[in-house]
Image (spheres, rainbow, N blue to C red):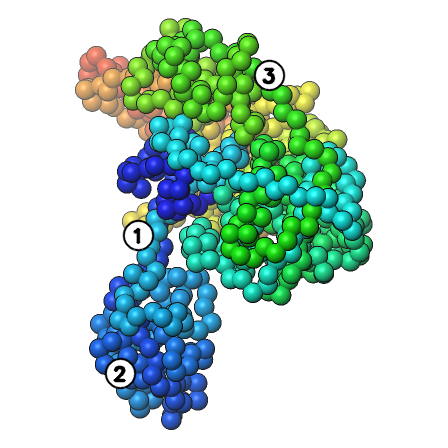
Amino acid sequence: MKVSLEWLGEWCDWRGTPEELAERLTRSGTEVISITSTGSRVKGVVSAKILEKKPHPNADRLTVCLVDDGGGPRQVVCGAKNHNAGDVVPLAKPGTVFPDGMTIKSAKLRGESSEGMLCSAKELGLAEEAEGLLILPVATGLGVPLEELFPGETVIEMEITSNRPDLASVEGIARELEALGVARKTRPPIPAIAAGILAGWKVEVENSKDCPFYTLTGLRVRPDIESPEWMKKRLSATGMRSLGLLVDVTNYVLLETGQPVHAFDAERLQGKTLSVRRAKPGEKISGLDGDTHLLEVEDLVIADGHGPVALAGVVGGRDSSVQKETRNILLESASFHAGRIRRTGRRLSLPTESSRRFGRGGLDPSLVERAKDRVIQLLSDCGALEKTEGTLTVGAVPARNPSPIPLRLDRVEKILGLKAGAKDIAIKLRALGLKEGEGGWIPPSWRADLREETDLLEELVRLSDLEKVTAVLDPLAEGRSMDDREDQGRRAIRSFLVERGYFETLSGSLTRKGGEKQVALTVAAGPEAAAYRDSLFPGLLGSAARNLSRGLTDLKLFEIGRVAGKDGREMIRVALLISGRERPVNWDDRETMTDLFSLKGVWDGLRERFSGIGEPLSLREVTPAEKKAAGIKVTVYVAEGNIGQERTGTTAYREVSSFPGVERDLALVLPETVTYAEVEKAIRASAPAELEALVVFDRFRDPSGVKVPKGFLSLGCRLQFRSGARTLTEQEVGGWEKKILESLSTRCQARLRGVL
């Protein structure tokens, strides 16, 4: 919502700076997102009269003009076509600098000297589009700066929340400022037009729920009346173009009151009946937005004897729109069902000023009559109204009998921390337009969002100076809920994986049918969204495929999300995916490809760090069928497992020993059927507590059987011993080594390679 401070100044007495006004509105919950200025944006441009105009001798599209800005004639070359001798136009003299950095200089254009530039409204920042020069009134003096002819206005733009449709108008903002302590100015009431019944026309409303109240007023107007400059200026400040008096007045009333109104050209309608009804299958309408829209049976339209002439509450029809020569208009002012208008506007991507206001719902029903009377008043003030021919009404102003909202004073202090007396609270609520009744406070007709005690508490706190409210912690507050702790645990898992080079992916939870544990949707959103996923793998593979197709072959991806588990219950899982090289290639490091051990190492790190993660449900290479379905051609490894409900564990602190360690390398020969897990188990079964690390540094098999017998393999294991209390002796390390070799011999049939 945009509004100029000059316009707002007619409603309230604000004497501070625009920034202070923005701060006050933002603190009360109505965010001001910008403060801008209108008017001429170029300093140094003055008015000048064209004394002579002749064609350029060397360019068909240029003219040579002799202009006078009060300081004597000068020659200017111009490319516009809409000017003639005697016109008064803006002149930018040499030295003028435009906002984009362009500086006007004396120069020769195709052989003719040019001392300046004649300007359009667009170049001066007065309009978004312009087809030629800005022609000023003939009576304009020469040499007058354009900033004096077009003084700027300060415009504030506010973000109106969906529950506050009453703020989408100048009157609504003025009411809000009054509640914030800004004095409201007294304005003359809008005169109620005592018109008779409109003869010769008929209005039919198909469903009163779609349109509870509809008015149609016939007006005869003069077609030769221009919009007054003050009206054009205010519409321009809010981003609206002037489109003629009849359209400008309806737009002005919409911005002023918040109630959309629409004018039909009575002579362009077919028949003498207007129907408010649902659209019929196959009906179309050519809208004022320039597009032709195919309608659906849920769309609400205004139709004449031929078909739809307007989309109710959204956009008018081109075929029934008012023209410059229009003399007879039918003025529509009505209430429409908010949800229906909102759905139509969204489906057709028509976020018009009208659909935004109707779509929010909660418009003050009394505005229907007031907006109609305001249009008639403005047309009369502008000298365009010749006759009011009468009004047709269908339905009535929707009755609003809100129940009094109780407000307990003890709740104000307990919930808000405000120590305010009943008198102070009553002053604030009355400033909002509420009236005290039996059993509570009755909200005004424009505040349909106030329904319960909590709403009143919100109003009180936003109208208060929050910096003066003492912060008090609830002694019963736990601090963090179980959900908070679980979310914190998942955040820690994310950090752990990111630190190890993994990137998080996010994929949709709906997939095509096929998994054993998937939960099928009763109503599928499409073939690719017919069931709730039972694994994170499909989403990860899709992300991998997109990255691989763009040349990113070294992948480390992970995802944390919900899946359908046993009996359809939701489970939270973490899934990992790797492909390509383990780390970037460096000149002093050999290329290392990822494998299952890379993935298992990270998973073991997760298990050690976080108590809620157990053994992976799946740790494997992606099958050829899965790769083909995802469009992947390289080797990819994946792992997936559940994240339990246990609280995130912390790594136990271990003091670093200050004593030296002792290493022993064992070159073992053992049957190739023995797994490494069995070897590790045999070593740790007889190793002392001083065994700090166990690393495999070599694995060798000789197919010829010369160095290592066939059916056997050589395994190089490095054992590192260290004590935290003393220096180890050669004798005790040798004893430990002997016991380990005995265990390997018994459990794995392993021997030292030199002892065959």
Disc 3 and disc 2: Cα gap in Å? 74 Å
Q: Are marks 3 and 2 in contact (CB under 8 Å)?
A: no
371 relative to 582 in the view: left or right: right
Outermost residue on the bottom side: it is 57
Occupied quadrant, residue 192: top right
- Name the residue carrying label 2: 74
Please tell me which residue is depicted at 35% across the width and 51% down the height of the picture: 153
- Of the numbered discs 3 and 2, the one sitting upstream in the chain is 2
- Give the amino acid at mark 2: Arg
Asked if 109 appears above or below 220 in the picture, the reply is below
10 Å neighbourhood of mark 1: few (<14), some, or many (≥20)?
few
Please tell me which residue is depicted at 56% across the width and 57% down the height of the picture: 384
- Give the amino acid at mark 3: Ser
Asked if 279 appears above or below 646 in the picture, the reply is below
Q: Secondary structure at mark 2?
A: strand
Quadrant where the C terminus is found in the figure: top left
- Name the residue carrying label 3: 403
Occupied quadrant, residue 243: bottom right
- Of the numbered discs 1 and 3, the one sitting upstream in the chain is 3
